Image (tube, helix red, strand yellow):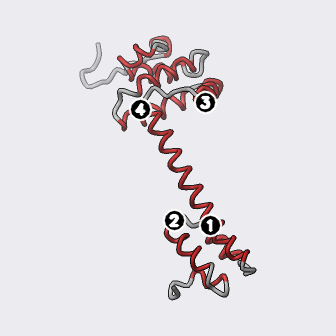
Amino acid sequence: MTNPGSLTPLVLGPEGVPVVTDAEQAKAAPEVVVLSAMAHGLEEAGEAIGVAFLAAAAGLDQERRGLYADVVLSSLNAAARRTLEAMMKSGYEYQSEFARSYVAKGRQEGRLEGLLEAKAQGVLAVFEARGLEVPADIRERVLASKDVAELDRWIRRAAVVTDARELLDTNGS
């Protein structure tokens, strides 16, 4: 006889969780495909489970997509992750809005990173073309900048200052 105040935990092992590899089944029960990945993602079925999850992710709100995707990806075996990455790189068309949004976000971040790097190199190139020596601390500061407007200002200033240290002088033009 159990005490009315006691708790009896329910335990669900891998054998109690279905292997979900069908996209329609995954769409109908996205939480089950997440459990499937957690229980069976390290097995041979890991890749198929991951693909099924991508189909299911399209119907989820952004918060659940992010949380579930993190759990699924961290639950898959390395081979499954590599295979999915190869599929995606070889023209695989993402089925879920979640995946498409993260790819778009990554592209946007990559473009910004490239723009910042190009502008920083532009500042240094102007100094080089003018024959001005750039001290290491100034070089590091320019290369570390994450502000497009600041780098644009510095490109213009690099064309007129007489010493690279003047670049950071906020009292100047």
Element at label 4 = helix
Looking at the picture, does residue 115 appear above or below residue 150?
Answer: above
How far apart in space, not on screen, are marks 1 and 2 (Cα)?
A: 9 Å
N-terminal-most mark, 1 or 4:
4
Query: What type is the residue that disc 3 sits on?
Result: Glu
Query: What residue is shown at x 48% (from left), y 39% (from top)?
Result: 102
Q: CA distance from mark 1 to mark 3?
A: 32 Å
* Mark 4 vs mark 3, CA separation in Å: 17 Å
Viewer-proximal residue, 33 or 154? 154
| Residue designated by label 4 | 97
Q: Identity of the amino acid at label 1? A: Ala
Give the residue at mark 2.
Answer: 148
Disc 2/disc 4 C-alpha distance (Å) = 30 Å
Image coordinates of residue 129 in percent, x first then y, are 73, 75
First in sequence: mark 4 vs mark 3? 3
Within 10 Å of the Cα at label 4, are there few (<14), some (14-19), or many (20+) other Cα atoms?
Answer: some
Q: Are marks 1 and 2 in contact (CB under 8 Å)?
A: no
Q: Position of residue 50 (x, y in %)?
A: 52, 23
**Quarter residue 124 falls in:** bottom right
Mark 1 or mark 2: whose residue is earlier in sequence:
1
Left of 147 or right of it: where is 125? right
Q: Which secondary structure, mark 3?
A: helix
Q: Position of residue 161 (x, y in %)?
A: 62, 85
